[in-house]
Amino acid sequence: MRFSLLLILSLWGCLNSEAQWLTADDFFNDGAHLYLSNNIPQALRSVETGLKQYPDDDHLKKLYQLLKQQQQQQQQQQTVVVVLVVERGYLMERRV
């Protein structure tokens, strides 16, 4: 019983520390890949996690700034679509 409890605690510690095994480059590459796949929210989460561990990494900082700009542009484009629908007088509900 005691052995299985120690094994469970050891495995839990390994799972929780998985992100600690990743380098700043790993987080950058993951974020860049997600960015190229147009998955901005997930890319931001990956880069933010990397910045928590490597707050001084210049590549992660620059990618974070790029992702935030992309996120802003997407939000502005969605707002423009809603405004155009309203201006044209369409009576429809559109979720963005």
Image: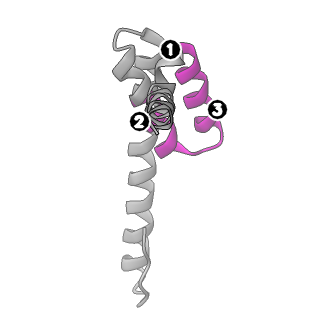
- Disc 1: which residue: 24
Say which element carries label 2.
helix
N-terminal of the pair, mark 3 or mark 2, is 3
Identify which amino acid the numbered label 1 is placed on. Ala
Identify which amino acid the numbered label 2 is placed on. Gln
Question: Main SS of the magenta segment?
Answer: helix
Quadrant of the image occupied by residue 69: top left
Q: Nearer the viewer, mark 3 or mark 1?
A: 1
- Position in image of residue 79 (x %, y %): 37, 61
- Disc 2: which residue: 69
Identify which amino acid the numbered label 3 is placed on. His
The C terminus, quarter of image: bottom left
- Position in image of residue 87 (x %, y %): 37, 77
- Position in image of residue 75 (x %, y %): 39, 53
- Disc 3: which residue: 33
* Crowding at mark 1 (Cα within 10 Å: few <14, some 14-19, many 20+): many
Viewer-closest of 90 and 13: 13
